[in-house]
Image (tube, grey):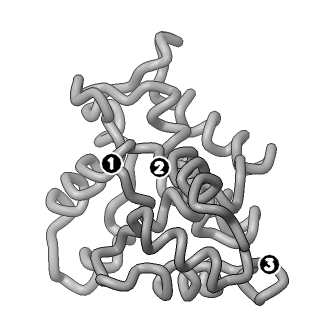
């Protein structure tokens, strides 16, 4: 994919969109197989199934764009992980490895959210949207280190440059 110009988020987005033939923003096993082979990644059906299973972190049988990006981009650089860890530590005052929604609310800056700026939604609505997408996988009202890192791995995968990502973290969490 890299050789075919899919180095940037935009390029990877085009590849993913071409695979998503039904437009549901997810790629099922058949779309994934056909799409990868059309991109020149000549894989067998079994190899494609194994790759899909690996990328499908939410285990719904499909690959969404965030899963696709994280899988292709890999783990965060040390610089990005440091910013993610620093933000988590800001809230995990007791060192338990968990933070609550209330802990996040006190410092997460939603004023810069594009829909808040445009007046489409309020700051409260933006915060609720944020929490809904944040990744409290077990629904216990707390965010573990693992859930935090999973969320920011997806965010990181959609940002091309380390400096931009680190600035995003500093701006969002006021540190």
Residue 114 vertical position relative to residue 172 in the rendered view, above or below: below
**Mark 1 near mark 2, Cβ–Cβ under 8 Å?**
yes
Mark 3 packing: few (<14 Cα in 10 Å), some, or many (20+)? few
Q: First in sequence: mark 3 or mark 2? A: 3
**Mark 3 near mark 2, Cβ–Cβ under 8 Å?**
no
Q: Residue furthest right?
A: 3
Looking at the figure, which quarter contains the N terminus? bottom right
**Mark identifier at residue 2:** 3
Mark 2 packing: few (<14 Cα in 10 Å), some, or many (20+)? many
Q: Residue at x 80, y 44 (%)?
A: 78
The residue that label 1 is drawn on is 60
Residue 19 vertical position relative to residue 145 in the rendered view, above or below: below
Q: How many discs mark residues in the rendered view?
A: 3
**Percent of width and height locating residue 65:** 47, 67
**Label 2: element kind:** loop
Q: Residue at x 37, y 30 (%)?
A: 143
**Mark 3 near mark 1, Cβ–Cβ under 8 Å?**
no
Q: Which residue occupies the foreground of this view, 32 or 106? A: 32
Q: Is residue 169 visible?
A: no
**Label 1: element kind:** loop
CA–CA distance between discs 3 and 1?
27 Å
**Label 3: element kind:** helix
**Percent of width and height locating residue 57:** 47, 44
Q: Residue at x 15, y 61 (%)?
A: 125
Q: Which residue occupies the foreground of this view, 115 or 44? A: 44
Decide if residue 7 is on the left or right side of residue 173.
Answer: right
The residue that label 2 is drawn on is 56
Q: Quadrant of residue 42?
A: bottom right
Q: Residue at x 38, y 49 (%)?
A: 108
**Percent of width and height locating residue 130:** 30, 54
CA–CA distance between discs 3 and 2?
21 Å
Residue 142 vertical position relative to residue 123 in the rendered view, above or below: above
């Amino acid at each position: 994919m890299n050789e075919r110009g899919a180095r940037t988020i935009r390029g990877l987005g085009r590849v993913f969109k071409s695979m998503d033939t039904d437009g549901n923003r997810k790629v099922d096993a058949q779309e994934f197989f056909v799409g990868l082979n059309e991109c020149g990644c000549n894989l067998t059906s079994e190899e494609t199934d194994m790759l899909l299973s690996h990328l499908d972190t939410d285990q719904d049988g499909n690959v969404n764009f965030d899963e696709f990006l994280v899988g292709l981009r890999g783990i965060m650089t040390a610089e990005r992980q440091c910013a993610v860890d620093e933000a988590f530590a800001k809230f995990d005052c007791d060192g338990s490895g968990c933070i609550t929604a209330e802990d996040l609310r006190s410092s997460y800056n939603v004023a810069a959210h594009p829909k808040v700026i445009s007046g489409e939604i309020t700051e409260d609505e933006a915060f609720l949207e944020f929490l809904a997408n944040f990744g409290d996988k077990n629904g216990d009202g707390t965010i573990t280190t693992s859930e935090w890192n999973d969320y920011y791995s997806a965010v990181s995968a959609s940002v091309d440059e380390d400096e931009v990502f680190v600035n995003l973290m500093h701006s969002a969490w006021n540190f």
